[in-house]
């Protein structure tokens, strides 16, 4: 290796590991976290390492850094790391150390939320199921068996981080840790034992000597020195429980989770930006987005119940790792604006005044440093605020930020960032030519109905499902034979009451009916199934299934699932009713195909000779496929299937359920960002399946010879599924002549004294792309939204040619939005520029 190559390698290594070379002290005072004695304003974002792949982590982290983040926040998932007591898994997606080091390599800090209860819409709240079976245990209370296990795992994680020198006190990136999680929301029923438990948890955590502060979120009584923090859509009104602790926001919900049977939540970026600006306006100095990248609930990790496989969360980086515009870009601009105020923010407390109803001015001033936030809290009326001798126009539900107490750098309601339209390009799934199978390319195996495994067992009465399966499978068979000699051919009804989450009933081997819980009532499942008994013995096979275990609430760990009864035969001849609940039932945990390892696709029992069964329950399907070309993210469209689970090359991509649709009537055509946001405010996708597209990480795929295995539970046609790749179809921007200049131009504007006007900017999402066409351009009064712009009453005839000249052939372009550029097509009228472009 030549000398200059050695120097370059050394520079790269030093750059990668610079964050691990210098030890830092981390403390706090009433204003902020102190890193090496200096107060810091910190912007953070949540990325959960098991919800993406190690191959995705560096890109996700770099996009977070490019978006203006200082910190990556993650939970630690106990049930991922210790699925069996004493047997640990820190490999692949569970490689916590690798993830933390990847964050360090990007030069960012880490907030490690050990919990070990995490909620997170994660199966069983992150607790391993074996914990439930420890004698005498009671979760999250002053209970010695639970505290011993919690301390053992917490210490395990802390020791692992210490051994790798990952705490800031050792030169690593971890500047914060969290113990427990949102306990204050549900601690009432635990009484005095809950209070003593929280005091114990705080003492236990601080005794581990991490050298960095600990936090508890949503815990107003968090004992010193634990910092209590806020979670929610808005935290500007939050006050820590001590005047010696900083105001911190550990979860700013960028959207909301999606449930099977639910509509898709969306949170407008104008509202998020308003909430963030209000938080810093009123004294906050640490703010975290939950989520910044949501990712995917692979395998059976989704909780709920009924949480979808997608955990997109409407986050600034979407499930597939693509930045979501304009959310990512507008928040990036907001972060730049806040950082312009940092020296003033950390120097003093704000002076807050109200110049009018629902108007607020906050000033941070000390010596020659001055920054101001002007807020209009009204959700329907714009306002004019006079401040320091100047007048400022404030749109409703917005904050203007003035880093010098004079010039506005950003208003939260005015978006300069471009937006994007993403689309999936699909191709039908095709079998390899080498696959000797039916003409469809699919082979199959039937899953037996009822008891088929040697480890079945009998028991008097109805068994609770979680205690029986220990969550080794979603499925539990309940089987019973009943002699109905005198009731043959009667039109009877089988009444079943269950804790859910779904149920299939078979009578004499044939599907008689199915039922599922609904999004608004996930636990109760009562169903009446019409049946026609035969003379003599009748076999009743009930398949109860879970769709993610409960993850939130007081005593959620003992809520239970499965058929708890009663199970009653009604409407027999002579009006007889038979309660079957206390009969001797035979039980089988899981499916025969699960025990045979069919998910790997390697078994030799696959049938490829006879006709492929379609729209039939309990079928395992297998096919081979070539990976879609290119490098764009891959998904499978499961339209045409019913419900089940899918594996690619032996790795579970999660549960699929494209037949579970959102109800009509809870969505609106438009979303007004003004006014308080709730998770049901801006829903979309009503009347359509909650999720049809399922992420397949590129790193799981080979160029060809990939194996796809499905277990179809309710009936579907696998030949209808398709593979797709996600790409950006269009870039759009709509900038008015009243917009502010880009944030990065603020210094040049103020220092030179020369007025800088609004600018429309476009940039292709990938470095190797250029803008290839301008699909729409109008300066004047354009109307519509991205993908559906149209000309208004006036439009400059120069707009298209100017945009084509400025942009085509370049990876990015910027055009000033003014009559100086385009002329004046309609004098005396407020104007704007709308553009839609494509990149190739």
Image: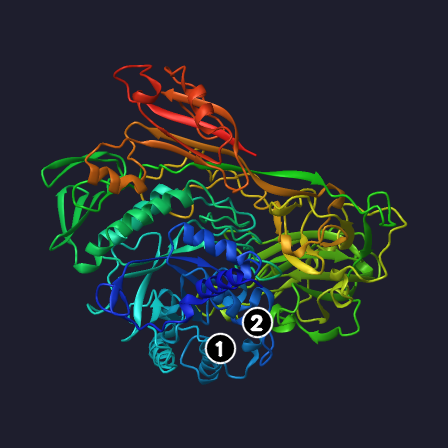
Q: Residue 717: which quarter of the image?
A: top right
Binning the other alpha carbons within 10 Å of mark 1 as few (below 14), some (14 to 19) or many (20 upward) gives: some
Percent x, y for residue 513? 70, 51
Q: Residue at x 38, y 16 (%)?
A: 796
Q: Which residue is mark 2?
A: 90
* Marks 2 & 1, CB-CB < 8 Å contact: yes
Res. 470 mark: none
Where is residue 167 shown, x and y percent of the image?
40, 73
Residue found at x 18% / y 46%: 404
* Mark 2 → mark 1, Cα distance in angstroms: 11 Å
From the image, which quarter does the N terminus lie in?
bottom right
Considering the numbered disc 1 on the image, is that residue within a helix, a strand or a loop?
A: helix
Label 2 packing within 10 angstroms: few (<14), some (14-19), many (20+) = few
Q: Residue at x 31, y 16 (%)?
A: 824
| Closer-to-camera residue (565/701) | 701
Q: Which residue is mark 1?
A: 160
Instruction: In the displayed orientation, state which residue is furthest to the front.
Output: 3
Q: Is residue 231 above or below residue 421?
A: below
Q: How is the image coloured?
A: rainbow
Q: Is 262 positioned to the left or the right of 369 in the image?
A: right
Q: Is residue 225 above or below residue 9?
A: below
Mark 2 or mark 1: name the one nearer the start of the chain. 2
Q: Is residue 161 visible?
A: yes
Quadrant location of the C terminus?
top right
Whether residue 119 can be seen here = no
Looking at the rendering, which quadrant does residue 174 occupy?
A: bottom left
């Amino acid at each position: 290796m030549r000398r200059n190559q050695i120097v370059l390698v050394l520079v790269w290594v030093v750059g990668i590991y610079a964050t691990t070379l210098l030890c830092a002290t981390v403390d706090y005072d009433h204003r902020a976290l102190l890193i090496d004695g200096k107060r810091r304003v910190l912007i953070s974002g949540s990325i959960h390492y098991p919800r993406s792949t190690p191959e995705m982590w560096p890109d996700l982290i770099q996009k977070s850094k490019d978006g203006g983040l200082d910190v990556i926040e993650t939970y630690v998932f106990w049930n991922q790391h210790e699925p069996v007591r004493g047997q640990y898994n820190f490999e692949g997606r569970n490689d916590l150390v690798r993830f933390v080091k990847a964050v360090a390599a990007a030069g960012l800090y880490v907030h490690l939320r050990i919990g070990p209860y995490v909620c997170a819409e994660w199966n069983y709240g992150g607790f391993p199921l074996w914990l439930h079976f420890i004698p005498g245990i009671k979760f999250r209370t002053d209970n010695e068996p639970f505290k011993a296990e919690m301390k053992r795992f917490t210490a395990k994680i802390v020791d692992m981080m210490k051994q790798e020198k990952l705490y800031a006190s050792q030169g690593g990136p971890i500047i914060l840790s969290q113990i427990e999680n949102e306990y204050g929301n549900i601690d009432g029923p635990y009484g005095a034992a809950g209070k003593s438990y929280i005091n114990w948890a705080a003492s236990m955590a601080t005794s581990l000597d991490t050298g960095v502060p600990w936090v508890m979120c949503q815990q107003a009584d968090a004992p010193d020195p634990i910092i209590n923090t806020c979670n929610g859509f808005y935290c500007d009104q939050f006050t820590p429980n001590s005047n010696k602790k900083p105001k911190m926001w550990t979860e700013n919900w960028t959207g909301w989770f999606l449930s099977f049977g639910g509509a898709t939540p969306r949170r407008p970026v104008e509202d998020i930006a308003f909430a963030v600006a209000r938080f810093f306006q009123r004294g906050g100095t640490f703010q975290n987005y939950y989520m910044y990248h949501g990712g995917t609930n692979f395998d059976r990790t989704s909780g709920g119940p009924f949480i979808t496989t997608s955990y997109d969360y409407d986050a600034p980086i979407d499930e597939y790792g693509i930045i979501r515009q304009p959310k990512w870009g507008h928040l990036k601009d907001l972060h730049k604006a806040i950082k312009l105020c940092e020296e003033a923010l950390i120097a003093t407390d704000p002076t807050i005044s109200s110049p009018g109803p629902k108007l607020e001015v906050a000033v941070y001033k000390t010596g020659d440093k001055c920054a101001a936030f002007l807020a209009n809290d009204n959700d329907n009326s714009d306002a004019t605020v006079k401040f320091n001798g100047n007048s400022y126009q404030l749109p409703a539900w917005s904050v203007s930020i003035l880093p010098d107490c004079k010039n506005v750098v950003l208003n939260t309601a005015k978006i300069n960032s471009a937006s994007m339209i993403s689309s999936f390009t699909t191709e039908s799934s095709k079998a390899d030519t080498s696959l000797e199978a039916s003409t469809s390319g699919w082979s199959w195996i039937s899953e037996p109905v009822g008891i088929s495994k040697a480890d079945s067992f009998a028991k008097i009465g109805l068994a609770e499902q979680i205690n029986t399966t220990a969550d080794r499978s979603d499925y539990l068979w309940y089987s019973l034979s009943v002699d109905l000699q005198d009731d043959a051919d009667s039109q009877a009804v089988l009444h079943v009451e269950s804790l859910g989450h779904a149920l299939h009933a078979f009578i004499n081997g044939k599907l008689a009916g199915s039922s599922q819980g609904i999004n608004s009532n996930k636990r109760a499942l009562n169903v009446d199934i019409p049946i026609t008994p035969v003379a003599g013995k009748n076999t009743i096979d009930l398949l109860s299934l879970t769709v993610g275990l409960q993850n939130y609430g007081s005593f959620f760990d003992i809520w239970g699932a499965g058929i708890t009864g009663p199970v009653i035969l009604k409407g027999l001849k002579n009006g007889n009713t038979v309660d079957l609940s206390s009969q001797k039932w035979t039980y089988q945990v899981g499916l025969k195909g699960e025990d045979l390892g069919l998910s790997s696709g390697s078994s030799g029992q696959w049938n490829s000779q006879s006709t492929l069964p379609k729209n039939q329950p309990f079928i395992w399907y297998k096919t081979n496929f070539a990976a879609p070309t290119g490098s764009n993210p891959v998904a499978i469209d499961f339209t045409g299937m019913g419900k089940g689970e899918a594996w690619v090359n032996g790795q579970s991509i999660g549960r699929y359920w494209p037949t579970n649709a959102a109800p009509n009537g809870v969505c609106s055509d438009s979303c007004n960002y003004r006014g308080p946001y709730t998770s049901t405010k801006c829903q979309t996708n009503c009347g359509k399946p909650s999720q049809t597209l399922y992420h397949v990480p590129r790193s799981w795929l080979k160029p060809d010879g990939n194996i796809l295995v499905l277990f179809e539970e309710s009936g579907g046609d696998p030949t209808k599924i398709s593979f797709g790749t996600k790409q950006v179809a269009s870039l759009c921007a709509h900038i008015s002549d009243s917009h502010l200049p880009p944030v990065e131009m603020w210094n040049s504007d103020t220092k030179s004294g020369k007025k800088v006007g609004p600018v429309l900017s476009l940039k292709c999402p990938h470095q190797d792309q250029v803008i290839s066409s301008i699909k729409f351009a109008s300066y004047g009064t354009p109307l519509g939204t991205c993908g559906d712009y149209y000309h208004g009453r006036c439009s400059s005839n120069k707009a298209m040619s100017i945009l084509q000249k400025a942009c085509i052939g370049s990876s990015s372009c910027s055009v000033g939005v003014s009559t100086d550029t385009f002329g004046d097509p309609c004098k005396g009228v407020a104007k704007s520029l709308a553009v839609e472009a494509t990149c190739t």
